[in-house]
Image (cartoon, rainbow, N blue to C red):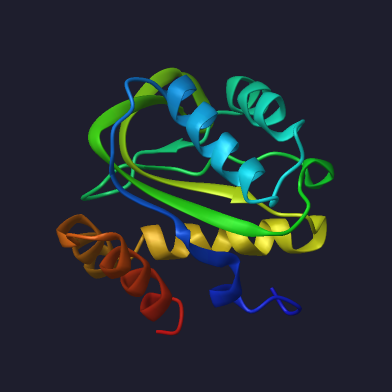
Amino acid sequence: MNAVNFSELFDLSLVFYDLEVKSKEEFLEKVSIELETKKYVKNSYKDAIKARELKYPTGLQTEIIKVAIPHTDPEHVNKSVISIARLNKPVQFNEMGNHDQTVDVELVFTLALNDGKNHLGVIQRLIGLFSNGEVMKKLKKSDNKEDLLNVILESMYI
């Protein structure tokens, strides 16, 4: 992550608190439309992220609050951004590395990254964040989207 300032990857208008969706598919649809409306992604992004999530699931059995990190290839992205959604009720995602298991996800980081070189670095930093129990407790306790984003930004510089 040398070339990208991590804090620049977030846009408060793409942080959703208490988002109501009934399924992973509905979630991916809603967030993709928001990303496309704000010109972060191309119209191919929605189908690409759905297809990739089916083939390579991103649900993580993290402690305290379960997480998913759906993403797709850089050619579907205009400008890099990470959308964050705290769901009002858990939604099932298939588990990363174990397609047969599901994870009741409450927090979703949707990645739209246009630089393949930084892709892995961003994912590694997020997984590092997810392994920090104190940060995960703060994320679970956050009560609005500003608080949610601030916890993440503060934790990136610990």
**For this view, does 6 lie left or right of residue 105?**
right
**For this view, does 47 lie left or right of residue 104?**
right
Looking at this rendering, what residue extends furthest in the top direction? 100
Q: Nearer the viewer, residue 92 or 32?
A: 32
Q: Nearer the viewer, residue 133 or 24?
A: 24
> Which image quadrant: the C terminus?
bottom left
**For this view, does 106 lie left or right of residue 111?**
left
> Which image quadrant: the N terminus?
bottom right
Count of labels in the image: 0
Q: Residue at x 80, y 55 (%)?
A: 116
- Corner quadrant of residue 59: top left
Q: Residue at x 63, y 43 (%)?
A: 37
User: Could you say where residue 86 lies in the image, as x and y percent from the top left?
Assistant: 31, 47
User: Could you say where residue 98 lies in the image, as x and y percent from the top left?
Assistant: 49, 25
Q: Residue at x 68, y 57 (%)?
A: 120
Task: From this view, report whether residue 89 is shown above or below residue 81.
Answer: above
Looking at this rendering, what residue extends furthest in the bottom direction? 158
Q: Residue at x 84, y 43 (%)?
A: 75
User: Could you say where residue 154 lies in the image, as x and y percent from the top left?
Assistant: 37, 80
Task: From this view, report whether residue 137 is shown above or below residue 62.
Answer: below
User: Could you say where residue 131 lies in the image, as x and y percent from the top left?
Assistant: 36, 60
